[in-house]
Amino acid sequence: MDLRYSEEYEAFRGEVRSFLASSWPLQGDEAELPAVEQAALFRQRAIEQGYLARAIPRSYGGSQQDPDVLKATIIGEEFARARAPGEMRGIGPSMLVPTLLEHGAEWQKERFIPPTIKGEMHWCQGYSEPGSGSDLASLKTRAELQGDEWRINGQKIWTTGAQISDFMFCLCRTEPEQSKHAGISYLLIDMKQPGIEVKPLRQLNGGADFNEVFLTDARTPADHIVGKRGEGWIVSRSTLEHERNMIGDARQTKFIFKGLVRLAKQMGRLDDPAVRQRLAELEGYIAAHEYSGYRQLTCAARGEDPGPVSLMNKLVSTNIQGMVAKLSLDLVGDGSLAAPDGSARGMFQGLRDTSGWVSQYMWSLGIAIAGGTANIQRNVIAERGYGLPRDAAAQSSK
Amino acid sequence: MDFGLSEEQEILQQTVAQFLEGECPVTRVRDIFDADEPYDAKVWAGLCELGIAGLLVPEEHGGAGLGMVDLALVAEVLGRGAFPGPFLGHALATVALLEGGSEAQQRRWLPRLASGEALGSVALGEASGSWEPDEWTPSLDGDMVSGTKTWSPAAAGADLLVVGVAGGELVLVECGAAGVTVEPIESVDRTRRLDAVVLESAPCERLADGARAARRVRDAGLALLAADAFGGASRLLAMAVEYAGTREQFGVTIGHFQAVKHKLADMAVEVEPARGLYWYAAYAWDALPDESERASAVAKAHLTDRFMQAARDSVEIHGGIGFTWECDVQFWFKRAMFDRAFLGQPALHRERAAALGGWAA
Ligand SMILES: Cc1cc2nc3c(=O)[nH]c(=O)nc-3n(C[C@H](O)[C@H](O)[C@H](O)COP(=O)(O)OP(=O)(O)OC[C@H]3O[C@@H](n4cnc5c(N)ncnc54)[C@H](O)[C@@H]3O)c2cc1C
């Protein structure tokens, strides 16, 4: 066990600081570029230094560094201090990229990973359908190979970010004669084509991040399949695991908790003994989740199995976010009578003001449902983690 | 960065676990639980032979020279096994001497405590929740101490008591001395029975740096209780999972019912990720002095609450049998009650964590 910041790490912090001092914000002509381009330029330089995309091989545009939580923490802290663009997160970088690294063909990795981690290519996840949510393997969207092209027909729903995505990774039924799970393939589909229609759905918090996606004779080349025909279910398990890890990431719960303490201070409630108790109780969960993450990373580095805890991250995180949400609403007080304003509707946007917290209060439910509901997580934990019997009716649960 | 156990630490845990399985299985725990004698001296002697009593003591004083992480790992295993004996008080008395004893005091006591030849304990708590050093009341008059301490673990059999006195200091009292009366308390947790200690002008010796030692003893105690709670809670979970796989109703094992299955999953989600809290608290005690006080407060508050809830859930999952004296679940249920209250309730330590975190309007 060793969590000290040794001299090596202090030196590393110095390197990161001096890199940031000379690299962000951009200077001269570069400072005139649109914000998105500035961020992309900066990210590229940070990747070259080994500060971002650390888990991704150099050949796919990453910086290929050994996993090191302390270094990652230092980078996170220093980048935040300098208000510099950090790691690209979200559906493409956090879910598709690791899936491609595991299951993708060489050309797919070369073509799709570099622009995705630079934030130049956006992805959406086409899994859920109106009739297939928790029971995902019952999905009906059909893909048929015609010549050197797939023709896709069907409907997806709750597709986050479909309206701003370049591509969708999509589960389709390609082998209808096979059993439920063995009939599914994992296709990569260009969103900018006539066969695809996107209709935004308005969420509980007023925003419209998710959509319905209608596929009518949509096309994609025959080689835009990850894994073999009929292996889509296996590939999708990998993406789903990354989604759950993304939602379960302890850095996120810690970030939200810091915001919550700030909110309590802003609202002048930190002297209230009841508020202090609830914050301190939450901190037990926050810290436990954080150290559990350290332990899982150590196990990964050593090639050891951390045990059932690796199945729990999503539920742990969404439980915590639910508790945070409840306390935040009490702190916001009468502010919760006002609808969240437009700028506060994105997830984690605007945790700094009461409107953002009202939105986050609602989001805490969205993440408890997305990526497999809390009940489905409980099934997975009990069945795979502790060997309890599988639900008779839900052998195919997501 | 590394947040995992070394091979030696894993072997240490396995060794203690095997010893308990052989010498103190749950049937033996039951005998001791129901017996008049507060613990089995033979089992404790066996543990001392393994070196557990002197784990923290430097080699020059006859110990193993290991750290709080190692001791906490042992505490987890003892918690898992519901070890009935004087481990906690002995460990804390040893910490007191290590952290605040003069050279002469260390030379006199540490070798005997490390070997288990002498048994130590602490007398810290006082009536109704006064656990913190600044709340202690016994007064000193020269080399004599007078006052009443409650909740002293296994004081009756101890040779040496480390007593918290006014001013947040610690003094050493030998149990056989005149003016020391030890009165057994009918304790809820019969695996770790408590005594009241009444001191009437009892001879004592001031610990050289008692004020510092008092805080280190408290933080060590909180980390060790958190470790015990994690061990106990994981055992309760394992017992409930096992029962759900054997007990049949409506023609299937009760683990088939999603209500049971989900309760087990929820227990696991509360307990399993919290292991690192006690690791971190113990590690901070060894290596991160600025964080130790707060980390141990958070760990104790959180894990002992999780332990108590796991005990309630486990009783429920066992049904009627779970509510009996005969069911083994009760050992851990009552250890949870001990861990939660001893050295102060979760609310006390949450308030300390809030203050230490600088949370003020
Ligand atoms: C904010 C948000 C973003 C999303 N983004 C995407 C996306 O980008 N792409 C995508 O494909 N999908 C996305 N989803 C969809 C999400 O994956 C599904 O909503 C989820 O899997 C649940 O499916 P469902 O909505 O059909 O609910 P249902 O499956 O109908 O579930 C309804 C209720 O029944 C319970 N239930 C169902 N089966 C069981 C069982 N076996 N045991 C116990 N209880 C059960 C559920 O827990 C739930 O409480 C998103 C959802 C949300 C809320």
Image (cartoon, coloured by chain):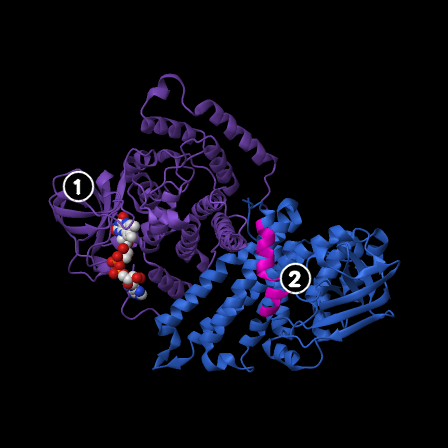
Element marked by disc 1? strand
Seen in the image, is A211 located left or right of residue B92? left
Q: CA distance from mark 1 to mark 2?
A: 67 Å
Q: Amino acid at mark 1?
A: Pro
Residue that numbered label 2 is attached to: B343
Chain with purple colouring: A
User: Could you tell me residue B1's position as x and y percent?
Assistant: 55, 44
Q: Residue at x 57, y 31 (%)?
A: A11
Position of B274 with respect to A370 (left or right) is right
Observer-nearest of B210 and B283:
B210
Mark 2 residue type: Leu
In x, y percent, where is residue B343? 65, 62
Residue bounds of the magenta highlight: B337-354
Q: Chain of mark 1?
A: A
Chain shown in blue = B
Quarter of the picture containing the C terminus of chain B is top right
User: Circle 2 — which element?
Assistant: loop
Residue A162 higher or lower than A292, as above or below: above
- The percent coordinates of residue A335 (x first, y second) are 38, 47
Q: Position of residue A353 (x, y in %)?
A: 40, 41
Residue behind mark 1: A221
Please tell me whether residue B347 belongs to the stretch shown in magenta: yes
Q: Quadrant of ligand 1?
A: bottom left
Q: Main secondary structure of the magenta part?
A: helix
Q: Nearer the viewer, residue A160 or A347?
A: A347
Asked if A180 appears above or below B23 in the picture, the reply is above
Q: Is residue A21 left or right of residue B257?
A: right
